[in-house]
């Protein structure tokens, strides 16, 4: 099986026995071909990884292929990159052009609001695109576990939001769930209400607070979500705002998630280029592979490729 680099005329630097890798979560952006407010004119001082000025430039397919050249990369899933919300479908069309030229991404998680007047129309427009397999739409959340927004407009209890969310089933689309850890139990309630909608929890549920109290809260949220068989988890984004990427600390996060969800519902994902603020692509991919190595090759292959292939319904000719 050719790597994406080889398909694009680049040498593959992956070892002969390297794991096949389907990256279940990455981003691309061309700042000259679309508007990305968070990268161009709305810098967020409270970004979860701290200073992200290094990201405020193009991140194109060529950049992604170069950074992942030592991995046996055979497919990817692109997750919406917060392009201007009046360009939601335009982002999808641009990614289709990228796919036509470079052979990836092989699935798209696009954007559509659930609680706006045009929600049904935008969702239908995204669902009509062949590569779109899911939607990421972030609900309103609180800034800390000590503040409640329960029931406010746009939250996971808002009837209008829930009505829009329910339309995913009509289009057979999954939901990429991205909330702080103190909202995970609420998300589990949504998963239970809609068992036919596949859900992928982003970024290992954001284990930001590594104190005993914080880890207990995070674990409780994962356990609540794992009770719902329609929920998978992405082993991604272990970066912390004020700390370097530490193998042993992140190993605890990865193995806890694997213990709770099982090897059949975990997917490796890079979250590049964002995760690159804390570690290289190889540091993350090789690190997670090493963490899983004691469990055997079958578990590694499930987490690194097979589960993403199944969850996002990738066709064999997309690999």
Image (cartoon, rainbow, N blue to C red):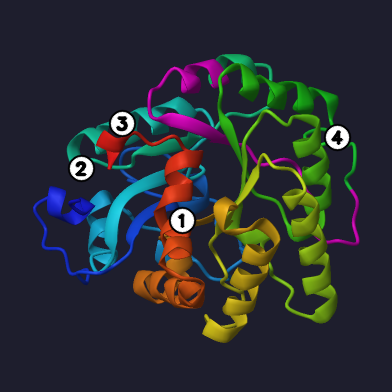
Q: Which residue is mark 3?
A: 96
Q: Which residue is mark 1?
A: 302
Q: Earlier in the sequence, mark 3 or mark 1?
A: 3
Q: Earlier in the sequence, mark 1 or mark 4?
A: 4
Q: Earlier in the sequence, mark 3 or mark 4?
A: 3
Measured in 3D between alpha carbons, the distance from the residue under mark 2 to the one under mark 3, in whole angstroms, is 10 Å
Mark 1 vs mark 4: in front: 1
Residue 95 lies in quadrant: top left
Q: Secondary structure at mark 3?
A: helix
Number of residues whose C-alpha sits closer than 10 Å to that of mark 4, classed few (under 14), some (14–19) or many (20 or more): some
Q: Earlier in the sequence, mark 4 or mark 2?
A: 2
Measured in 3D between alpha carbons, the distance from the residue under mark 1 to the one under mark 4, in whole angstroms, is 34 Å
Residue sitting at x 38%, y 29%: 131
Residue sitting at x 31%, y 31%: 96
Look at the image and give the residue range highlighted in magenta: 123-148
Question: On the rendered image, what quadrant is the C terminus found in?
Answer: top left
Left or right: 77, with 151 as reference point = left
Measured in 3D between alpha carbons, the distance from the residue under mark 3 to the one under mark 4, in whole angstroms, is 34 Å
Q: Secondary structure at mark 1?
A: helix
Q: Is residue 73 visible?
A: yes
Q: Secondary structure at mark 4?
A: loop
Mark 3 vs mark 1: in front: 1
Q: Which residue is mark 4?
A: 157
Query: As rendered, which of 241 and 57 lies closer to the eye?
Result: 241
Q: Which residue is mark 2?
A: 102
Measured in 3D between alpha carbons, the distance from the residue under mark 4 to the one under mark 2, in whole angstroms, is 41 Å
């Amino acid at each position: 099986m050719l790597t994406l680099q080889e398909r694009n005329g680049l040498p593959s630097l992956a070892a002969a026995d390297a794991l096949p890798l389907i990256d279940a979560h990455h981003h691309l952006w061309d700042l000259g071909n679309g508007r990305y407010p968070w990268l161009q004119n709305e810098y967020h001082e409270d970004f979860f990884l701290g200073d992200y000025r290094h990201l405020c430039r193009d991140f194109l397919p060529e950049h992604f292929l170069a950074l992942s050249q030592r991995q046996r990369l055979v497919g990817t899933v692109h997750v919406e990159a917060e392009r201007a919300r009046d360009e939601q479908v335009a982002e999808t069309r641009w990614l289709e052009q990228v796919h036509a030229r470079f052979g990836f991404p092989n699935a798209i998680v696009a954007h559509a609001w659930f609680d706006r007047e045009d929600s049904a129309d935008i969702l239908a427009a995204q669902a009509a695109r062949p590569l779109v397999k899911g939607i990421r739409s972030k609900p309103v959340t609180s800034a800390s576990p000590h503040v409640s927004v329960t029931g406010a407009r746009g939250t996971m209890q808002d009837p209008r939001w829930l009505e829009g969310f329910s339309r995913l089933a009509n289009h057979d689309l999954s939901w990429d769930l991205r909330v702080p850890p103190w909202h995970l139990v609420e998300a589990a309630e949504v998963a239970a209400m809609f068992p036919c909608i596949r859900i992928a929890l982003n970024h290992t549920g954001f284990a930001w607070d590594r104190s005993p109290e914080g880890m207990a809260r995070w674990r409780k949220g994962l356990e609540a979500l794992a009770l719902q068989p329609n929920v998978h988890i992405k082993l991604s984004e272990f970066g912390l705002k004020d700390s370097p990427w530490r193998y042993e600390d992140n190993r605890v996060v990865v193995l806890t998630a694997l213990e709770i969800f099982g090897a059949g519902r975990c997917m490796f994902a890079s979250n590049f280029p964002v995760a690159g603020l804390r570690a290289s692509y190889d540091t993350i991919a090789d690190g997670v592979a090493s963490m899983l190595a004691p469990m055997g090759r079958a578990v590694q292959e499930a987490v690194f490729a097979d589960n993403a292939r199944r969850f996002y319904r990738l066709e064999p000719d997309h690999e």
